[in-house]
Every structure is written in C-alpha cells, then in structure tokens.
Amino acid sequence: MESSTIIMTEESTRIRNYLTKEGAEHFDDIYFKRKLGATANIRSLGGMYKDVAAQGARRGSESSKVIDEILDITAFFRRLRGDSSVAIATAMDILTGDIEKFRTYPIGETAAYIEKVNEAYEEEASSWEKVIKNYAYEIIKDKNSMLLYDYSSLVGDVIKEASRENHVMDLYIPESRFLNGGLPFVRDGIQGKHRVHFFPDAAIMYYMKKADLAMMGAETFLPNGDMINTIGSELVGIACRRYEKPLYIPTTLIKVDYRATYGIRRKELFRDLKDKMSEGWEIKLKDEVDFACPNLDIVPPENITAYITERGVIPPAALFSECRSYVGDLRNKIYNRINYR
C-alpha cells in the first residue's frame, strides 16, 4: 500500500545518483509528485534519459554503462508508476525500445540516438496537445460554465485557450481531498479571469446541476470506453448522467490500456491516508483506524459523451478501432522523424 508520506529509500537514492543536479530535478518532479499528469511525467523521464546520455558522453563512458543506467531508471519508474499510468509505461517502451542495439556503439552515437528519439517523441506529443486543445475549445466556445475534476494539463490548456479568446466562464472546481488536484485549475482559472467556484468534492452532485458540461483528464482508458482516473471521478460521471450533462475526456491515445483484451486485470491500488486525514487526532486513536483508500475509479462508457483525442472527438463505442494500431503507428512516426529503422 502506498503511503501519503513520500520518503527517499535506498533504491530511489541509488537511481537519483545517476543524475546531474538538473537531471535530479526531473527525478524529484515524478518521485515527490511535484508535477501532476502523465504528460509532465513523461517529459521528466525523457529529461532523465537525456541527462544520463549527455553525462556519459562527457565522461567518455561505455555505451553499455549508459544503457544499463537508463534501463535501471525505466524499471524503477515502471514499478513506481506503471501500474497506475499505462501512458508512462508505453512511452518508456517507445523511448527505450531499441537502445539495446547500441551497447557496442561509440558513446557519441548512443547519446545522439537517445537525444533524437526523445526530441522526436516530444515533438509528436506537443502536436497532440495543440490538436486536442483546439477540438476541446470548439466544444466549449458557446458554453458558459463547466465542472473540472482532478488536474489535467490538457484540460488546463483548454481553460487557457478560453482566456486567450476572451471567453470568460464559471469554473466549478471540486477539490479532491485525496490528491489536492483542484488547486492547479484554480490558478489557471484566476489567471485567465474566469469566475472560479471552489468546493469539497462531496458537493459534486450539487454543483453539477449548475454547469453546462464536465471535463476530466484520464489516467488511463480501456478499448471498451472505460475511463480510469483519480477516486471521485465516477461520482462526476454519475452526476453528469443524472442531470443529463455532457462529460468529455480530453486525452492522448497513448493512454489506452490494451492489457484487458489479453485477460490481464488491473491491479487495485490503495493509498494509506493516515497522515492526510488524521491531523490532530490522538495517536492511540489513529492506530485503531484503517485509512486505506483506493487510488482510482472507473467511469463506465455509458456516462461519457466522448473522448477528445489527437484523432478527433471519439464516442466510447468507437475507441477500439481507433486505438488498435496506435502504438505501432506512433513508434513508426518517431523513427521516421529521426530517419531510424
């Protein structure tokens, strides 16, 4: 069970020591959850890969040493985040998929490849974000209000786009007591001159009646249309269905989890919220209570209007055919950008 208090361990210290001061900032962003969202975490992983490669090139290290360190970083973060975020696991597979071939190459060639493949992925990812933001703004441009749950950088971009268009909205933002995921939305909303309404997530049903629609990012989604996200997300879906309000999920297709089609079930993850929920309690009382809380909810497809993706606005029933060849197509696009086979 994951604790709500994050401390360094012997293993995490060892991994962090591979990195320069700049690279260690990327490590800390993921490990201490300083940045939320798979997109930001993938950028940080790419930053660590490039840091190790550049450091190896400066030192004249053997390519095999650099590759071992990168694979060690990958294995560590796969254990840390891979079960909760398929996007991170998929991105790591793409970014490291061919580096074993470089074990006997000169370090300069190996470092150049690692730099190029990460830059190519970043270029692809940046193009997705722009497309998704534009599709999403088309949906909200004639709306006056929306409810936003659990921070997503893509949803944050939609708020900022509304601000650039001088489109002021009422933003209903529940604070997830589990994650404190509402505060970044509050900052984006206030900076954009929107009217921000901030309240506990227990009041989602009440405020959903006031909103024109709801938007949430996705931690992961399944080919059948199920969306998996922070605990409390299912309540948003239920509220939308009850009050007949649209629910849109802006997400990149890299977040699809195909393991379910092979009979692999997601591991149920829990977090110990003792430190978060028992401040001021007597120690004896704390020790008598179970503070375990599931990390994630599943929002079923019948409660979702559509996914807003780089390939368009897709209803849940159409996801399977859209995602079937996605990972292979993405890998080919990245390799084509760097003229690598």
Image: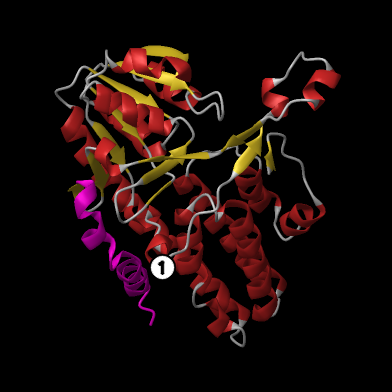
Say whether residue 90 is visible.
Answer: yes
Residue 312 at x, y percent in the picture:
19, 49
Residue beneath the point at 24% across and 20% down = 243
Residue beneath the point at 51% across and 63% down = 92
Residue beneath the point at 35% across and 50% down = 126
Q: List the single residue furthest toward the front.
A: 288
Tell me the SS state at disc 1.
helix
Residue 158 at x, y percent in the picture:
30, 32
Q: Nearer the viewer, residue 332 or 320?
A: 320
Residue 290 at x, y percent in the picture:
71, 30
Please say whether residue 235 is one of the residues in the magenta stretch.
no
Please say whether residue 325 is one of the residues in the magenta stretch.
yes
Determine the main secondary structure of the stretch shown in magenta: helix
Residue 157 at x, y percent in the picture:
34, 34
Q: List the single residue furthest toward the right.
A: 284
Scheme of image coloration: secondary structure
Q: Amino acid at mark 1?
A: Tyr
Snapshot quadrant of residue 105:
bottom right
User: Which residues fall within the magenta stretch?
Assistant: 315-341
Name above or below for residue 338 compared with residue 277.
Answer: below
In the image, taking residue 80 as reference, residue 133 lies left or right, namely left
Q: Nearer the viewer, residue 228 or 153?
A: 228
In the image, taking residue 203 as reference, residue 207 lies left or right, namely left
Q: List the single residue furthest toward the bottom.
A: 104
Identify the image quadrant of the C terminus.
Answer: bottom left
Snapshot quadrant of residue 78:
bottom right
Name above or below for residue 320 compared with residue 340.
Answer: above
In the image, taking residue 228 as reference, residue 3 lies left or right, namely right
Identify the image quadrant of the N terminus.
Answer: top right
Q: Which residue is mark 1?
A: 262
